Image (cartoon, grey):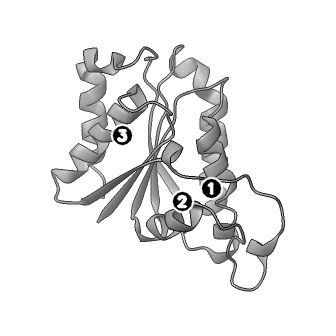
Amino acid sequence: MKILGLVGSPRRGSNTDLLVNAILEGAAKNNYATEKVYLYDVEIDPCVDCQACKKGKLQCALADGMQTLYPKLEEADVIVFGTPLYWYGPSAKMKLLIDRLRPYIASKKLKGKKAVLVVPSEEGADACSHVVGMFNLSMKYLELDLMSVLLPKASERGEVKGQPETLYEARAIGKHLK
């Protein structure tokens, strides 16, 4: 089984990064192959609504870093989407990635895969309803199974290190992926 962790935080060592790490650590306990990608290290251009992904090969026509991410997404059995909460939505890089998943609506290459959502925020779970709603609808549209959502209250860099129960929960999510 392959688990792909996508970190949508601009900061390495952020709460998002630490939580995605913990999920991947849990998955590694089952000898699952894991990989982590920092989205801020990948050039992701915005969708230009050219509609190329709806025709012919059902592929995005933009030549950017997404061309390296598409195969990783297709090879993964589980995709972990990690993003800090920015103005009640995902980070800019995570939103760019979501927008660029349009080719998978027609091609169905992600259909049946599983997804996990991790959104640490300053205000906690109550502030995350919009971003969770966006991911729920996006995963449904792509026919992915959003199997776990983790919404801890944590905004200061590394704050989750002082929350052993949150890290335990993240590792447990990874360990129980099937």
> How many other residues sit within 10 Å of disc 2, few (<14), some (14-19) or many (≥20)?
many
Is 58 situated left or right of 78 in this image?
Answer: right
Residue 70's x, y, as percent?
53, 67
The residue located at (39%, 33%) in the rendering is: 12
The residue pinned by badge 2 equals: 144
Residue 140: image tag: 1
Q: Left or right: where does residue 50 sit relative to residue 137?
A: right
Q: What residue type is disc 3 on?
A: Val
Residue on which disc 3 sits: 20
Q: Sequence-wise, which precedes: disc 1 or disc 3?
A: 3
Q: Distance between the residues labelled 3 and 2?
A: 19 Å
The answer to which of marks 3 and 2 sits earlier in the sequence is 3
Q: Which marked residue is nearer to the observer: mark 1 or mark 3?
A: 3
At 69% across and 70% down in the image, what residue appears? 60
- Residue 1 location (% of width, % of height): 29, 66
Taking depth in this image into account, of 146 and 109 the one nearest to the observer is 109
Q: Which amino acid does label 1 sit on?
A: Lys
Q: In this view, does 62 lie above or below 132?
A: below
Q: Are marks 1 and 2 in contact (CB under 8 Å)?
A: yes
Residue 139 seen = yes
Label 3, residues with CA under 10 Å away: few <14, some 14-19, many ≥20: many
Of labels 3 and 2, the one closer to you: 3
How would you rate the neighbour count of disc 1 (Cα within 10 Å): few for under 14, some for 14-19, many for 20 or more?
few
Q: Check the image and report above or below for 15 versus 81.
A: above
Q: In which quarter of the image is the C terminus?
A: bottom left
Q: Where is residue 30 in the image (x, y as percent from the top left)?
A: 17, 56
Residue lying furthest right in this view?
50
Is residue 157 depicted above or below 119 in this figure?
Answer: above
Q: Residue 10 vs residue 173: left or right?
A: right
Q: Residue at 62% x, 28% y: name it.
A: 129
Find numbered disc 2 in the image and state the secondary structure of the residue it sits on. Answer: loop
